[in-house]
Image (spheres, rainbow, N blue to C red):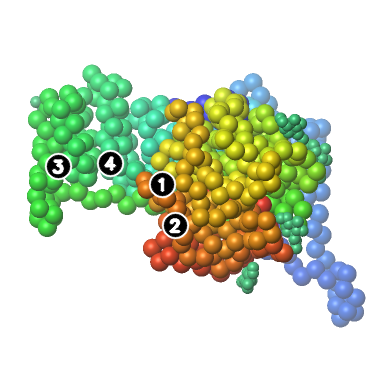
């Protein structure tokens, strides 16, 4: 079975903290105020005076079960011995029957087991049986990556539906591009409908990553077809689907070659660019050599040759664009000053216009560099109210937890952080005594920070952004000359060199820097005591800056992120107050608007990133 090909989850690499041992205590989950509970008036004198006194003892059941469990452990009053392999589990029929419809039917029916002292459970292994009987007595069970595959089928057999549900939730929390197809197959086998749908949707949404994995290559023809025929596949271009199909065929070419026409039926060739189509004809022998496959290619060519208004005459599913369900995003605001360094982290749900708290940072942190990379949020360096930090914490949204990775070489607060390619850059900043021109780069696969070329200028309170494969360091403060800066430098990772580009129209330290549609924005910031509300934008093609509409408020040391074609500027301070408001810029209307709901408190120097909304 292909379940949990979780090389990522199993091996302790720095990006993936070891899987949590999830300890589910069902008793605490179930004890909700809504549970049936006769009016409890034991401690109300008024009602007592009115006549009888009705009492419900909340701990009664728990105590009883505890005692029954102790009796079981001492093998007292046991009236049945469950046997699985070499394991024998003594128990009380009535307790087993009270939780499991399976045992209830067994012990109350006409079958021979209803009287037998020993009952053999053939389909469950001894260890698992013991765990489930423990659960029946204690309401506690531990679901882990190692036991979930046997626990779920066993719980299904004994009809312990709560345990089954917990197993499904656990698997859902483990969904990853490397294992979602295995989990989907497992859910299918055990008719866990909800998990099946979740795993399927996950595979569609992460198609590009999923097809890189072993699980994809091992799918059956029918499973591949079901995936690639889906309208909901999330792919940047149809090329990804075509290439996935070719790699699936090539994985076992002798057996799979003849299946190619069946797959081609679901690849939407007409949606490919003309250039790409021509290139396929030239290069892909698998297609050239089979007439049926060629027909699909001809159909696509024909589509491109027809004038746009006649293309609808080609009646086929293959011209229908895919309509992926976009994964909703949230904005995560990490730490900051309010007015001192804080641990609080809050998320903004754009669809629901709602702020909510998530797991706090492990320690207080403001003035950190915050970015999203490989599905996680990195909080790099910063200030904890007494010391500039070298440390880096990483947030995993699916698990709502922070964990540390390798520290930088230097202490840095008010640094710039940005991701270029697969690499995270920490740019400039302040180490507690001087402003820094040095730059370090982090590779998450090796969990290592290495120096790259330094900037030409020391820059603390620097803003950074990436456009077209180049990293830009914008403004900041040069401790040596005690000047706020209007200069801007560009870093080319290929040559490992920084060079100056056009200056901004004005000095800006602590500007909010972000990228929208291939342009670099610098919003607000300050020059000495003067806090700005002006915003300018850099076009790398023309190497020039131009002013756009002012923000509603003066802001420096604000957080910035871009999503759905809008640039958000979060918090900051206006020279006297730390702001809780957030505003966004729409480049098509050249307007700034405040979002309807402010953060729970004012914060400046917070870091902001955009992440997938957790399931
Ligand atoms: C193309 O593939 C189909 C399906 O396997 C097969 O029936 C047909 O003979 C092949 N055509 C050629 C020319 O190889
Ligand atoms: C706002 O934050 C600054 C640091 O950015 C801090 O010095 C100041 O005390 C804060 N002001 C208020 C009113 O919280
Ligand atoms: C800041 O970090 C240093 C070093 O880890 C620690 O000793 C200090 O207590 C921290 N300060 C605060 C205010 O958390
Ligand atoms: C800051 O960096 C300078 C130059 O490397 C170094 O001499 C100084 O000790 C550093 N300060 C702190 C507080 O780390
Ligand atoms: C948000 O904060 C701004 C000031 O920063 C204030 O003018 C506005 O009324 C606040 N909005 C809400 C909904 O509280």
Q: Position of residue 277 (x, y in %)?
A: 18, 36
Q: Position of residue 381 (x, y in %)?
A: 67, 39
For the image, the number of numbered tags is 4
On the picture, is 614 further left or further right than 251?
Answer: right
Query: Which label belongs to residue 546?
Result: 2
Query: Which label belongs to residue 543?
Result: 1
Dot in front, 3 or 1: 1
The Cα–Cα distance between marks 1 and 2, rounded to whole angstroms, is: 10 Å
Label 1 or label 4, whichever comes before in sequence order: 4
Write the residue at 64% across / 21% down: 86
Where is mark 4, residue-wise?
Answer: 238
Q: Residue furthest top?
A: 254
Label 3 or label 1, whichever comes before in sequence order: 3
Q: Nearer the viewer, residue 245 or 198?
A: 245
Label 2 or label 3, whichever comes before in sequence order: 3
The Cα–Cα distance between marks 2 and 4, rounded to whole angstroms, is: 37 Å
Viewer can see residue 139: no
450 to 353, vertically: above or below: above
Query: Which label belongs to residue 300?
Result: 3
């Amino acid at each position: 079975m292909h379940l949990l090909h979780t090389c990522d989850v199993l091996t302790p690499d720095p990006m993936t903290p070891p899987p949590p041992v999830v300890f589910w205590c069902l008793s605490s989950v179930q004890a909700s105020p809504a549970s049936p509970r006769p009016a409890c008036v034991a401690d109300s004198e008024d009602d007592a005076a009115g006549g009888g006194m009705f009492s419900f003892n909340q701990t009664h059941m728990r105590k009883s079960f505890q005692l029954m469990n102790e009796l079981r452990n001492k093998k007292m009053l046991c009236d049945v011995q469950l046997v699985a392999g070499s394991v024998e589990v003594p128990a009380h029929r009535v307790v087993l029957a009270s939780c499991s419809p399976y045992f209830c039917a067994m012990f109350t029916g006409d079958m021979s087991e209803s009287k037998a002292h020993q009952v053999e459970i053939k389909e469950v292994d001894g260890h698992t049986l013991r765990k489930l009987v423990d659960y029946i007595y204690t309401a506690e069970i531990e679901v882990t990556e190692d036991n979930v595959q046997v626990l779920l089928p066993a719980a299904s057999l004994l009809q312990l539906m709560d345990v089954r549900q917990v197993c499904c939730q656990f698997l859902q929390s483990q969904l990853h591009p490397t294992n979602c197809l295995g989990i989907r197959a497992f859910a299918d086998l055990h008719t866990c409908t909800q998990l099946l749908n979740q795993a399927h949707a996950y595979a569609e949404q992460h198609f590009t990553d999923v097809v890189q994995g072993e699980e994809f290559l091992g799918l059956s023809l029918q499973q591949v077809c079901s995936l690639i025929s889906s309208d909901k596949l999330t792919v940047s271009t149809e090329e990804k689907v075509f290439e996935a199909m070719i790699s699936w065929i090539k994985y076992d070419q002798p057996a799979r070659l003849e299946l190619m026409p069946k797959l081609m039926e679901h690849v939407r060739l007409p949606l490919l660019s003309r250039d790409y189509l021509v290139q396929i004809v030239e290069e892909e022998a698998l297609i050239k050599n089979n007439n049926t496959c060629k027909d699909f290619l001809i159909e696509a060519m024909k589509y491109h040759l027809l004038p746009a208004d006649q293309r609808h005459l080609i009646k086929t599913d293959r011209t229908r664009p895919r309509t992926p369900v976009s994964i909703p995003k949230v904005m995560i605001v990490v730490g900051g000053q309010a007015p001192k360094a804080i641990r609080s982290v809050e998320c903004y749900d754009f669809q629901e216009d709602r702020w909510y708290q998530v797991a706090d940072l492990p320690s207080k942190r403001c003035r950190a560099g915050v970015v999203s990379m490989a599905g996680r949020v990195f909080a790099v360096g910063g200030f904890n109210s007494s010391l500039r930090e070298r440390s880096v914490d990483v947030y995993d949204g699916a698990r709502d937890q922070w964990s540390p990775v390798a520290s930088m070489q230097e202490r840095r607060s008010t640094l710039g952080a940005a991701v270029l390619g697969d690499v995270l850059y920490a740019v400039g900043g302040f180490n507690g005594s001087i402003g820094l021109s040095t730059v370090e780069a982090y590779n998450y696969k090796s969990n290592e920070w290495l120096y790259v070329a330094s900037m030409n200028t020391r820059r603390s309170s620097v803003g950074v952004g990436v456009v077209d494969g180049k990293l830009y360091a914008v403004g900041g403060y040069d401790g040596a000359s005690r000047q706020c800066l209007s200069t801007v430098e560009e870093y080319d990772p290929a040559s490992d060199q920084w060079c100056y580009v056009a200056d901004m129209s004005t000095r800006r330290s602590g500007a909010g820097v972000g990228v929208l549609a291939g342009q670099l924005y610098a919003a607000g910031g300050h020059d000495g005591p003067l806090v700005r509300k002006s915003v300018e934008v850099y076009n790398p093609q023309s190497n020039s800056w131009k002013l756009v509409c002012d923000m509603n408020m003066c802001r420096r040391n604000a957080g910035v992120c871009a999503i759905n074609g809008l640039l958000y500027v979060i918090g900051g301070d206006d020279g006297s107050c730390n702001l809780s408001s957030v505003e966004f810029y729409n480049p098509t209307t050249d307007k700034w608007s405040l979002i309807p709901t402010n953060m729970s408190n004012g914060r400046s120097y917070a870091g902001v990133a955009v992440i997938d909304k957790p399931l």
